Image (cartoon, rainbow, N blue to C red):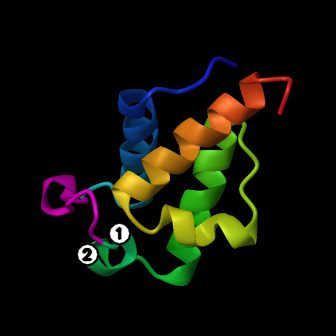
Amino acid sequence: MKPLDDAEAMDVVKESITRIIPDADLASVGPDDRIRDVLELDSLDFLTLVELLSERTGIRIDEEDYPELTTLSGATRFLVERSRDRSDPAK
């Protein structure tokens, strides 16, 4: 799979959120707002988000990675960096 760019990664994050909360008002979520707080995601919803992101991108997401996924900008950055790492055999 080719590396994700910022726009692709952000789309994956937003589309995954709307699969969990179909009526989520993503316009109300700033890039550095805590997703769980603004959208009132409980822990099960957050784990579902992690699972969806992993399934849709093929990127392994471990529990120690969860803090990177708390904001839209953080989740986007995480997916972009991991997708690059995965496509670079030297890493």
Closer-to-camera residue (90/76) = 90
Asked which quadrant contains residue 40, the reply is bottom left
C-alpha gap between disc 1 and disc 2: 5 Å
Residue 45, given in percent of the width and then of the height, sits at: 51, 71
What span is colored magenta in the figure? 24-33
Residue 47, given in percent of the width and then of the height, sits at: 61, 69
In the rendered structure, the answer to whether residue 52 lies left or right of residue 41 reads: right
Q: Name the residue under label 1.
A: 35
Classified by dominant secondary structure, the portion drawn in magenta counts as loop
Q: Which residue is drawn at 36% across and 51% down?
A: 18
Asked which quadrant contains residue 6, the reply is top left
Query: Under tag 1, what secondary structure?
Result: helix
Closer-to-camera residue (24/59) = 59
Say if residue 37 shows up in the picture: yes
Q: Residue at x 47, y 82 (%)?
A: 42
In the depicted structure, whether residue 47 falls above or below residue 21 = below
In the depicted structure, whether residue 4 falls above or below residue 81 = above
Residue 63, given in percent of the width and then of the height, sits at: 73, 71
In the rendered structure, the answer to whether residue 59 lies left or right of residue 18 reads: right
The quarter in which the C terminus is drawn is top right
Q: Residue 38's mark?
A: 2
Q: Mark 1 is on which residue type?
A: Ile
User: Is 79 in the magenta?
Assistant: no
Query: Under tag 2, what secondary structure?
Result: helix
How many residues crowd mark 1 within 10 Å: few (<14), some (14–19), many (20+)?
Answer: many
How many residues crowd mark 2 within 10 Å: few (<14), some (14–19), many (20+)?
Answer: some
Closer-to-camera residue (20/63) = 63
Q: Mark 2 is on which residue type?
A: Val
Closer-to-camera residue (39/73) = 73
Q: Which residue is drawn at 60% across and 50% down?
A: 52
- Mark 1–mark 2 CB contact (< 8 Å): yes
Q: Which residue lies furthest to the left in this view?
A: 28
